[in-house]
């Protein structure tokens, strides 16, 4: 995923071989505030850009779980900065949990890697495996 204005765009998508799966089509754009990848990118923005984002963006609730209020989203961003990983469950699509990490090239964030899993399969063991795989993959890029 890469940032395009106040949205993220899917650049490459790989769907699993599971019967129940979820993927965003390449070229599709979604608001930054409701996807794990978008939140990770927001969390890495300089404060001036983040201030502009909160002033300019229209944050629509995609589901009843979407965090649109400044305080909620800022709390998410602080947690992402501390942990280095973002999560968004049911925020863009009901039943889908996303996990993401920033991708850096020469120290600069150029996008995010993300895995989206149907909630019915997203247990603690899978969450840990996804986090580990994402961190390894992002480290291999930059």
Image: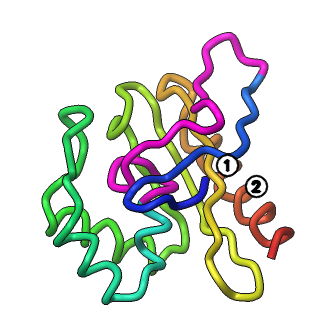
Q: Which residue is mark 2?
A: 133
- Residue 23 pos. (x, y %): 61, 29
- Residue 46 pos. (x, y %): 41, 87
Regarding mark 2 in the picture, which secondary structure is present there?
helix
Q: Quadrant of the C terminus?
A: bottom right
Toward the viewer: 94 or 106?
Answer: 106
Identify the residue at horizontal 60%, vertical 38% (top origin): 27
Residue sitting at the far top: 19
Q: CA distance from mark 2 to mark 1?
A: 5 Å
- Residue 90 pos. (x, y %): 35, 35
For residue 19: magenta? yes
Toward the viewer: 118 or 142?
Answer: 142
Magenta span: 17-38
Q: How many marks?
A: 2
Which color scheme is applied?
Answer: rainbow
Q: Which residue is mark 1?
A: 130
Please rate how many residues cluster around mark 1, counting C-alpha atoms within 10 Å: few if below 14, some from 14 to 19, many from 20: many
- Rendered position, 92 above or below 32: above
Identify the residue at horizontal 72%, vertical 17% (top origin): 18
Contact check, label 2 and label 1, Cβ < 8 Å: yes
From the viewer's perspective, tell me whether residue 38 is left or right of residue 106.
left
Regarding mark 1 in the picture, which secondary structure is present there?
helix
- Rendered position, 7 above or below 26: below
From the viewer's perspective, tell me whether residue 107 is left or right of residue 59.
right
């Amino acid at each position: 995923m890469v940032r395009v204005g106040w949205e993220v765009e899917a650049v490459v998508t790989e769907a699993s071989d599971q019967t129940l799966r979820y993927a965003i089509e390449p070229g599709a754009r979604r608001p930054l505030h409701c996807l794990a990848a978008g939140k990770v990118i927001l969390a890495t923005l300089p404060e001036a850009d983040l201030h502009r984002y909160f002033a300019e963006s229209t944050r629509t609730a995609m589901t009843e779980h979407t965090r649109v209020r400044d305080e909620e989203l800022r709390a998410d961003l602080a947690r992402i900065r501390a942990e280095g990983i973002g999560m968004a469950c049911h925020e863009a699509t009901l039943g889908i949990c996303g996990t993401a990490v920033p991708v850096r090239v020469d120290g600069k964030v150029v996008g995010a890697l993300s895995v989206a899993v149907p909630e019915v399969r997203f247990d603690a063991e899978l969450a840990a495996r996804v986090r580990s795989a994402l961190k390894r993959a992002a480290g291999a890029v930059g």
